């Protein structure tokens, strides 16, 4: 049997995601019309002999109750949310719930970061992992040398694929091969985390005796039960024939900002062509709006037949799109109204917002720039004929004049 664990983090971790994380935990923010965490969950569902999926985080339990019960029913696999009383780090969180995770006596445990977007080649990873017969296998990808420093950089043996060297977000270039935040382990991982934690306790006891060391040690602020998978496990266990790598040639992105969520929404929509074509709009009847490229429209949304939608557009529940509207590259959240002849390009429109007639809400679409996409927070009103370009508008604002390159507080 196999189990999967998805690390969802908690409220303090989503700060770069503001203002979209004000009323929805980041893991539940919709990408391609499905909560972010839904994509790794559906990938796990395809693993043979999967017994359970656990989401581990420090968000309030009630924020996930509805989602986990509906997804469990839909996939016919138990999905449970396990709440930490405080952050334990990516490995510490796993260890904290070891007894629950080991309930079914699984031979393998998948561990996935919630905020990565990829094709999750989990079954292939598991096969490779069994061939390597180590304690763990890490999904890795080659990226540009300039972007590698935002991630864990690593060196792998070109033949055996063993992880030889690992450095988390190094200041000087090590390698363009990076950690994708997707792992498979044998239950030995728990012993490894236990070792790190015990070692830290010993050090802490020693430090009571030598106060000079207390000032010098970089780990002095970390509690004994806080263990990071990258720095505390991958680095020390590299080169010991315990960790191996599996390289993906497919797409991979990290979702830390709203801009990246818009990009990843598009990547997931494109993937739906292969995995769930039934979720994509278009092809049905002549009365619907004209659809360009990959588009998701929630069944409860009302889109006028003269509107033109796509590519990369995702429209959530109860949205109303008026006549002559043009939408390109955007996420329109629940209960939004887009009135006649408005245009929305490269933007995220928050819950219950309203965009007036002949208005334009748009941006350049540079997903990595701070104002590269326009974001309207919850319940923003853009009045008729107003133009909003490359801006972020905080919740509950009314715009009656046009703005450009601004953050409206
Ligand atoms: N439950 C729980 N508890 N989850 C946590 C905790 C915790 O205390 N700390 C982090 N996480 C979750 C985050 O929500 C995220 O999904 C994942 O664990 C990793 O988060 P970080 O530890 O903040 O690392 P990162 O995202 O900056 O970088 C990691 O992932 C990259 C790939 O996306 C590193 O492992 C990098 O090396 C890697 O390239």
Image (spheres, grey):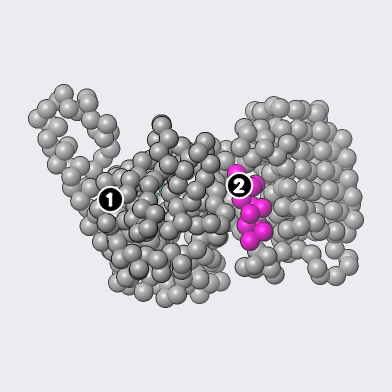
Q: On the picture, is 191 further left or further right than 24?
A: left
Mark 2–mark 1 distance (CA, rounded to whole Å): 35 Å
Q: For the C terminus, give its image quadrant.
A: top right
What numbered label is drawn on residue 388? none
Q: Quadrant of residue 126?
A: bottom left
The magenta span reads: 260-271
5 is higher (above) or lower (below) than 45: above
203 is higher (above) or lower (below) than 68: above
How many numbered marks are there? 2
Q: Earlier in the sequence, mark 2 or mark 1?
A: 1
Q: Secondary structure at mark 2?
A: helix
Q: Residue at the location (55% across, 60% down)?
A: 119
Q: Residue at the location (28% across, 37% down)?
A: 222
Q: For the N terminus, give its image quadrant.
A: bottom left
Q: Is residue 202 visible?
A: yes
What numbered label is drawn on residue 261? 2
Q: Quadrant of residue 286?
A: bottom right
Q: Position of residue 63 (x, y in %)?
A: 50, 53
Q: Which residue is mark 1?
A: 239
Q: Position of residue 112 (x, y in %)?
A: 44, 56
Nearer the viewer's eye, disc 2 or disc 1?
1
Viewer-side residue, 354 vs 177: 177
Q: On the picture, is 359 further left or further right than 98?
A: right
* Helix, strand or loop for the magenta stretch, by majority: helix
Q: Is residue 193 magenta?
A: no
Q: Quadrant of residue 20?
A: top right
Q: Position of residue 277 (x, y in %)?
A: 69, 68
Q: Position of residue 113 (x, y in %)?
A: 45, 52
100 is higher (above) or lower (below) than 206: below
Q: Residue at the location (33% across, 43% down)?
A: 231
């Amino acid at each position: 049997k196999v189990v999967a664990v998805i690390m969802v983090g908690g409220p303090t971790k989503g700060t770069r995601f503001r203002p979209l994380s004000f009323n929805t935990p980041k893991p539940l923010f919709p990408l391609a019309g499905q909560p972010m965490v839904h994509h790794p969950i559906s990938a796990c569902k395809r693993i043979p002999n999967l017994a359970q999926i656990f989401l581990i985080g420090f968000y309030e339990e009630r924020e996930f109750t509805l989602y986990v019960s509906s997804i469990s029913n839909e996939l016919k696999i138990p999905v449970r949310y396990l709440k930490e009383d405080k952050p334990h780090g990516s490995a510490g969180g796993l260890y904290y719930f070891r007894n629950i995770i080991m309930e079914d006596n699984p031979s393998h445990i998948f561990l996935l970061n919630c905020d990565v977007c990829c094709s999750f080649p989990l079954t292939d990873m598991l096969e490779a992992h069994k061939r390597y017969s180590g304690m763990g296998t890490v999904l890795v990808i080659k990226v540009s040398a300039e972007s590698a420093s935002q991630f864990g950089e690593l060196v792998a043996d070109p033949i055996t694929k063993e992880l030889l060297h690992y450095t988390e977000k190094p200041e000087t270039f090590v390698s363009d091969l990076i950690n994708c935040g997707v792992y498979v382990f044998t239950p030995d991982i728990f012993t490894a985390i236990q070792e790190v934690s015990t070692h830290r306790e010993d050090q802490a006891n020693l430090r009571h005796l030598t106060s000079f060391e207390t000032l010098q040690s970089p780990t002095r602020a970390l509690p004994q039960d806080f263990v990071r998978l990258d720095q505390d496990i991958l680095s020390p266990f590299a080169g010991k024939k315990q960790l191996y790598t599996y390289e993906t040639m497919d797409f991979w992105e990290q979702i830390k900002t709203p801009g990246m969520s818009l990009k990843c929404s598009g990547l997931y929509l494109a993937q739906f062509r292969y995995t769930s074509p039934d979720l994509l709009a278009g092809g049905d009847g002549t009365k619907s709006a004209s659809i360009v490229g990959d588009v998701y429209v929630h069944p409860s949304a009302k889109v006028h037949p003269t509107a033109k939608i796509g590519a990369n557009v995702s429209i959530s529940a109860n949205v109303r799109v008026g006549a002559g509207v043009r939408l390109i590259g955007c996420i329109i959240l629940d209960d939004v109204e887009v009135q006649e002849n408005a245009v929305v390009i490269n933007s995220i429109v928050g819950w219950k917002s309203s965009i007036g007639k002949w208005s334009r809400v748009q941006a350049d679409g540079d997903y990595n720039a701070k104002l590269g996409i326009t974001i309207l927070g919850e319940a923003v009103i853009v009045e008729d004929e107003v133009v909003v370009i490359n801006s972020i508008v905080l919740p509950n604002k009314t715009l009656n004049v046009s703005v450009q390159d601004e953050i409206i507080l």
